[in-house]
């Protein structure tokens, strides 16, 4: 019985300790075994609330198992296994320990039944994941990691304040439906929104993820944002504001992804685009929409991980990741090229690939609930993601030109991890019931009806045609050696410039005040020297007898006055 009640995060935390104490193949075997054993354990765990604890006058539920948490628990174990296999060649204790702690913290968060437990793992996600960025050991990764950590910890502080206000309002810490009633609801919503990369709150993702190590980015792509999606589905399902936030998230990253040169940065924008579909589905709030959002989160972890792994392999083998420096790699990296194309087809929602069977659920739910303009935005976003992730990533990395780089496919463990992800993408796309049976609500949705297949095929065909036309005419944005800033321009450019101008003005005023003060001090010194200096009237030498006489005069005057008084 006690084994059933063992929370899923515990094996990963134990694994982090063992990774710290072991070396070589033993460490690798331990790390690979933990997600396998953890997934088997979770599969046999019945839905229930475990580990109910009393904290002062309040009840905590550190381990709550239901269909929603199980859905994310399963995919987090899959993601951890793939990420660990992908990183088996790495001999870096920092990355391996941080990766285990990070995966365990994500599991702790999705099985948390109360807001206090959620907060603890929310912060553990931040502190463990930042080491995957710093592990690259460059100046850029260090600064990006600092910015990432500040924003992630800020999200946790906001969550804590909102939770305490929620406790004051409801006298409960149970993590269930929260909604936007009251200040506490908005604060918790904001905390979730930061981790989910809401518009204008998203730059920590596009700033930090491309600076992480090739293997660390695979871990990062799987957990933080998907924990936030889970939290929104748990606490804010049916909140209409999320429909519009999600629609904006699907569209605005497209423009930045098209002009980005760093291909991992393109994938970071693509991640926000896919998160938008999930957020939109949660906002619609119907059973079909929630199923679509959750299933798309499940699929995204796998196919986005596949794309991140393929670009990580390119970076690992060539030392380059900018589209302007790559091309022609299909000749010497054929296996990586093929696996990347599977990921590209999946994220683009080609029929028979995983993205198709989940993204269409969200779009169908939008139409069913009369969000026609939202549906058009999602349609535009579907075409856009095909442009920047389905075409741009494989085209500029492997086909666009012959860059002259001659290398080979990455180590076997990296290819194996990518192959596992590719097989899952195709299996779910061909047999969607494998995924649908795990969903929180029962569904009889059929993605392969004629309307869905025809609409999506036409959309992809015309998107490809548009790319070819723009590229042949030289109208498609070229891959330039540049860095593009979006909202982060405010805190990486504008605020430092304003702060610099402000402090420069302060230093100028300070300099003027100092000069004025020193001028007056010089005048006073000159005055004192003039009147009290050697040989002057007041400071002139006097005979001792004369001074004694004056003292006697003063004392006599004092005595006379005292008698008179």
Image: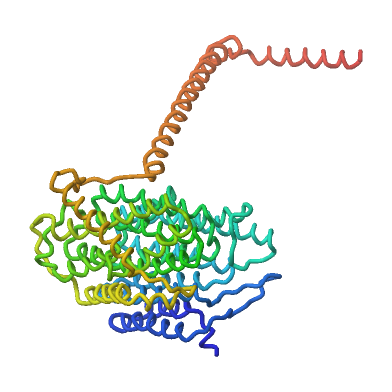
Image point (52%, 20%), residue name: 521
Observer-nearest of 423 and 132: 423
- Can residue 87 be spotted in the picture? no
Residue 11 visible in the current orientation: yes
The quarter in which the C terminus is drawn is: top right
Quadrant (top left, top right, bottom left, bottom right) of the N terminus? bottom right
> Residue 271, position in %: x, y?
35, 59
Instruction: Find residue 57 and report its image quarter.
Output: bottom right
Asked whether 27 or 56 is in front, the reply is 56
As drawn, is 258 to the left or to the right of 54?
Answer: left
Q: Is residue 46 above or below residue 316?
A: below
Q: As displayed, is residue 370 above or below residue 497?
A: below
Number of labels in the image equals 0
Q: Is residue 290 left or right of residue 36?
A: right
For the point 80% across and 17% down, the residue is 555
Q: Residue furthest front?
A: 450
The colouring scheme, among rainbow, by chain, secondary structure or one colour, is rainbow
Residue at x-position 77% and y-position 12%: 553
In the rendering, at what x and y percent does residue 457 appear?
Answer: 26, 61
Residue 327 lies, in percent from the top left, at: 13, 57
Residue at the limit of the structure toward the top, as seen here = 537
């Amino acid at each position: 019985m006690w084994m059933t009640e063992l929370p899923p995060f515990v094996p990963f935390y134990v694994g982090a300790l063992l990774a710290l104490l072991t070396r070589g193949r033993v460490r690798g075997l331990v790390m690979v075994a933990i997600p396998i054993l953890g997934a088997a354990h979770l599969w046999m765990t019945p839905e229930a609330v475990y580990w109910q604890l009393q904290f002062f006058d309040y009840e905590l539920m550190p381990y709550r198992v239901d269909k929603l948490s199980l859905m994310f628990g399963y995919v987090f174990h899959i993601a951890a296994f793939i990420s660990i296999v992908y990183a088996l060649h790495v001999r870096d204790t920092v990355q391996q320990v941080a990766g285990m702690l990070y995966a365990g913290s994500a599991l702790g968060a999705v099985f948390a039944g109360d807001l206090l437990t959620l907060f603890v793992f929310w912060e553990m996600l931040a502190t463990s994941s930042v080491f995957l960025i710093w592990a690259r050991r460059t100046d850029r990764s260090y600064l990006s990691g600092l910015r990432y950590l500040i924003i992630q910890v800020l999200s946790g502080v906001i969550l804590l304040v909102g939770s305490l206000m929620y406790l004051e309002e409801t006298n409960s810490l149970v993590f269930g439906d929260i909604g936007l009633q009251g200040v506490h609801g908005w604060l918790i919503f904001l905390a979730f929104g930061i981790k989910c990369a809401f518009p204008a709150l998203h730059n920590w993702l596009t700033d930090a993820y491309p600076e992480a190590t090739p293997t660390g980015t695979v871990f990062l792509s799987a957990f933080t944002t998907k924990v936030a999606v889970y939290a929104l589905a748990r606490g804010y399902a049916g909140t209409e504001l999320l429909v519009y936030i999600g629609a904006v998230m699907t569209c605005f990253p497209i423009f930045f992804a098209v002009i980005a040169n760093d291909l991992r940065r393109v994938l970071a924008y693509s991640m926000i685009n896919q998160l938008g579909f999930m957020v939109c589905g949660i906002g619609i709030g119907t059973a079909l929409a929630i199923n679509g959002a959750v299933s798309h989160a499940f699929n995204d972890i796998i196919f986005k991980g596949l794309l991140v792994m393929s670009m990580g392999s390119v970076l690992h083998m060539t030392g380059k990741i900018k589209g302007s420096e790559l091309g022609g790699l299909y000749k010497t990296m054929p296996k990586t090229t093929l696996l990347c194309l599977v990921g590209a087809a999946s994220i683009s929602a080609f029929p028979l690939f995983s993205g198709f069977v989940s993204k269409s659920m969200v779009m169908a739910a939008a139409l069913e609930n009369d969000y026609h303009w939202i549906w058009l935005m999602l349609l535009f976003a579907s075409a856009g993601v095909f442009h920047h992730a389905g075409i741009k990533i494989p085209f500029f990395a492997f086909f666009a030109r012959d860059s002259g780089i001659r290398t080979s496919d990455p180590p076997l463990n990296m290819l194996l991890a990518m192959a596992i992800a590719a097989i899952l993408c195709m299996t779910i796309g061909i047999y969607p019931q494998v995924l649908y049976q795990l969903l929180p609500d029962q569904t009889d949705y059929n993605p392969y009806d004629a309307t869905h297949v025809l609409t999506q095929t036409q959309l992809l065909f015309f998107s490809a045609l548009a790319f070819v036309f723009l590229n042949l005419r030289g109208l498609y944005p070229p891959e330039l050696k540049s860095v593009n800033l979006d909202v982060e321009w405010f805190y990486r450019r504008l605020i430092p410039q304003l702060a610099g101008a402000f402090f420069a003005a302060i230093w100028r005023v300070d300099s003027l005040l100092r000069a004025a003060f020193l001028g007056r001090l010089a005048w006073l010194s000159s005055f004192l020297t003039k009147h009290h200096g050697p040989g002057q009237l007041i400071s002139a030498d006097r005979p001792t007898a004369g001074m004694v006489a004056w003292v006697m005069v003063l004392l006599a005057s004092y005595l006379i006055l005292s008698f008179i008084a």
